Amino acid sequence: MPANAAPAAELSLAEPAISDAVRWRVLVVLLVTISMSLMSVSVVNVALPAIQQGLGASQSDLQWVLSGYTLTFGVVLVAAGRAGDIMGRGGWFVAGMALFTIASVAAGLAPSPRALNAARFVQGVGSGLINPQGLGMIQQYFRGQERARAFGYLGSIVGVSVAIGPVLGGLLIGLGGVELGWRLTFLINVPLGLAALVLALRWFPRPLFRNWRGAPGATADSPTRLWRALDPVGSLLLGLAVLAVLYPFMEYRATTASWLTLPLGLALMWTWVRWERRYARAGGMPMVDLGIFTTPSFANGSLIMMLYFMGMTSVWVVVALYFQQGAGKSALETGLVNIPAAILSAWAAHWSGARVMRLGRRVVIGGLLLGLVGVVLSIGVAFLHGRGAISIWWLVLTLAPLGVSQGAVVSPNQTLTLMEVPLAYAGSSGAVMQTGQRFGTSVGIALITSVLFAGLAVASWPVAVMMSLALVAGVTALALVVAFKDLRDRGEAAAHATVRQGSGT
């Protein structure tokens, strides 16, 4: 257990016991809401050409439609997770849903690219409030095999939502045309968001926010203790660090000046680490207990997640561009490519969720291997398609193993990574892991699409796609190395525990 867990546990009030029915109702609300936020990400991949035509958006505007959401999402994640740990996860979840829903209305009615991007920034904040609370509430309300099942359901909904997004986007754009269709891709969030809000207000355990003044054992200085526990200086430092590091990867054709924010971000990250250690030594309650990184399962699992998202998330962006701009397919046709992978992802998440407690990191290793195989086979399809030997639609088959990979990697890895984290840090530690995902996604998309466009400058679409997918394969191989390391670490830890038990120590 991390060294600094005690102060946070002291501040975090005991949660009332809830029935099985309430727990599973809470999970339904979490799944509906997270599904909404994920569809909002994937639907944009096929809506970009329509947005460009309907609003007269530039390439830079389109880049920010994708990146602005991710940027603000990453900036608020850890602070939002810590606020949920301390003040109550249900209340912040509801606040995030409300903000996301309002921003979806603003995005759907945006009169200009600037207004659309402003709405996307706010959507990212809302999603950043939602996601760490979702992970924290699963940690809070589920234990053991039931927790693995809950994460398995989460993985299933992730796979289905990411795949349905492009298909739904293609249908809406086809029905609504250039001007209305892309707007419907954002407005579709509104009925889902309202339904989730109603269910959350009806089913979430009370109170949504903790009453510090009236809580058992609370003192007159509870608001001061609450402010210190939220660690505002640490929150500001980390938010600025994430912003500075991610910014140059978000910019379309980033300038030399924008790249200067990268070393600034690393310096801010170093300052944040120093601040958190000093804050803990002074008796404060830091926003993140850095001791969680000494837990091998958390450190290894977070690195696996970052590398996996760096590679695999970019595949679907590359494929969407290849189909629409390289092969002249429609938005709907491009969305259909994802369906087999989505079905397999949902099945694999359910299957692995039922077995991850028994098989452990071997499930993740198997998923990474399948993903690597799928990427290599897709490189082969691009090669043969470039020579006119086969149809581009063969990618539907070679991308299918990536669906199994997603189901076998994401949710099982979350379960294993958060298994040994104290409940008092469930939200903030889950947010740290998700911040790594955002780093991986942002850096991966920037690097891999840069390789794609650099390839297009000197070669054909199939060659450029092969180059970008080769980079994906390399990153996935690195994640596989870390997964094998974690398997070895767990084996050594189990052996040491057996020796200690045998010697009676």
Image (spheres, grey):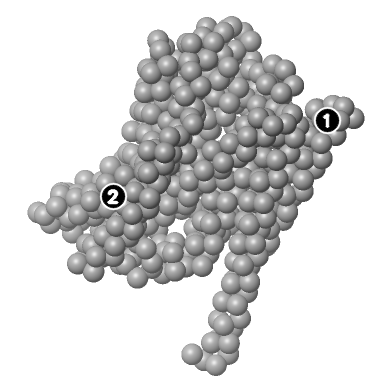
Whole-percent x, y for residue 220 in the image = 9, 54
Q: What residue is at 65 percent from the left and 30 percent from the top?
A: 457
**Secondary structure beneath disc 2?**
helix
Whole-percent x, y for residue 192 in the image = 48, 24
**Frontmost residue, 504 versus 116:** 116
Q: Which mark is residue 385?
A: 1
Looking at the image, the residue that sits furthest to the right is: 389
Q: What residue is at 38 percent from the left and 50 percent from the top?
A: 263
Q: What residue is at 84 percent from the left and 26 percent from the top?
A: 391
**Circle 2 or circle 1, nearest the eye:** 1
| Count of marks placed on residues | 2
**Secondary structure beneath disc 1?**
helix
**Frontmost residue, 96 versus 237:** 237
Q: Quadrant of the N terminus?
A: bottom left
Whole-percent x, y for residue 224 in the image = 14, 52
Q: Which mark is residue 155?
A: none
Callout 1 environment at 10 Å: few (<14), some (14 to 19), or many (20+)?
some
As drawn, is 461 to the left or to the right of 450?
right
- Give the CA separation, mark 2 to mark 1: 49 Å
Location of residue 92 (image quadrant):
top left
- In the rendered view, tell whether residue 483 sits above or below residue 430: below
Q: Which residue is mark 2?
A: 237
Residue 250 appears in view? yes
Looking at the image, the residue that sits furthest to the bottom is: 503
Whole-percent x, y for residue 300 in the image = 54, 62
